[in-house]
Image: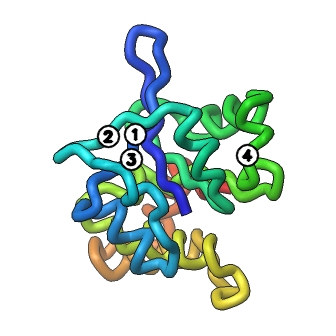
Amino acid sequence: TLLLDYSVNDGTVAFKVAPSNWMQTMMVEMAGGKPIWTDIPLDKSWTVVNLEQVAAWNPEVIIVTTYADPIDEVIALLEADPQWQELEAVKNGKLYGMAGDVYSWDQPDTRWTLGLNWMAATLHPDLFPDYDIVEDAKEFYQVLYEMDDAAFEQNILPLLETGK
């Protein structure tokens, strides 16, 4: 499993991987994935990797996160890229955008638990055949923030990015 951060700075796209002791790496591990990027020297913050490195890893599953761009647009761009189309994850329909709502669910805030649930269900659909992202998010907001169904449907549901 490869979790990549996608960002654009002055028109230049960058892909980065998280340090091995960061939330994003631990989430992949807790969800039952093997973070394949920890075999390279990692910085204390996100480490930039190029497409050649991604191709060398050729992961079965890629999860992309972004903190500035709409994730569905990023995934569409990557799926349309001929170089990305050569990767096993893309060939097999296993390129996902990290789920989120107000923020991406791989952030170190309360929603990381939603991200963990989503990631586990995405990596192991056979183990979580009844996973429902909307119901999971709705319950989360009810329990943690006492948000009723109407408030959830008005304020959170329109922002929900399912990652698929």
Report the quarter where the N terminus lies. Answer: bottom right
Instruction: Give how far apart the Cα atoms at labels 1 and 2 are.
Output: 5 Å
Query: Quadrant of residue 59 in the image?
Result: bottom right
Which residue in the rendered view is the most extreme toward the top?
A: 10
Residue topped by disc 1 = 16
Pointer 3 with pointer 2, Cβ within 8 A: yes
Which residue in the rendered view is the most extreme toward the bottom?
A: 127
Amino acid type, label 1: Lys
Instruction: Give how far apart the Cα atoms at labels 3 and 4 are.
Output: 17 Å
Relative placement, left or right, of 15 versus 80 is left
The local secondary structure at tag 2 comes to: strand
Q: Where is residue 68? Give x, y as percent.
A: 41, 31
* Residue in front for this viewpoint, 133 or 58: 58
Of callouts 3 and 4, which one flags the residue occurring earlier in the amino acid sequence?
3
Rendered residue at 79%/38% (across/down): 85
Q: Is residue 141 visible?
A: no
**Badge 2 local density, few (<14 within 10 Å), some, or many (20+)?**
some
Pointer 1 with pointer 2, Cβ within 8 A: yes
Q: Which mark is residue 47?
A: 2
* Residue in front for this viewpoint, 20 or 154: 20
Query: Quadrant of residue 107 in the image?
Result: bottom left
Pointer 2 with pointer 4, Cβ within 8 A: no
The local secondary structure at tag 4 comes to: loop
Residue topped by disc 4 = 87
Instruction: Give how far apart the Cα atoms at labels 3 and 2 are.
Output: 5 Å
Rendered residue at 53%/71% (across/down): 118
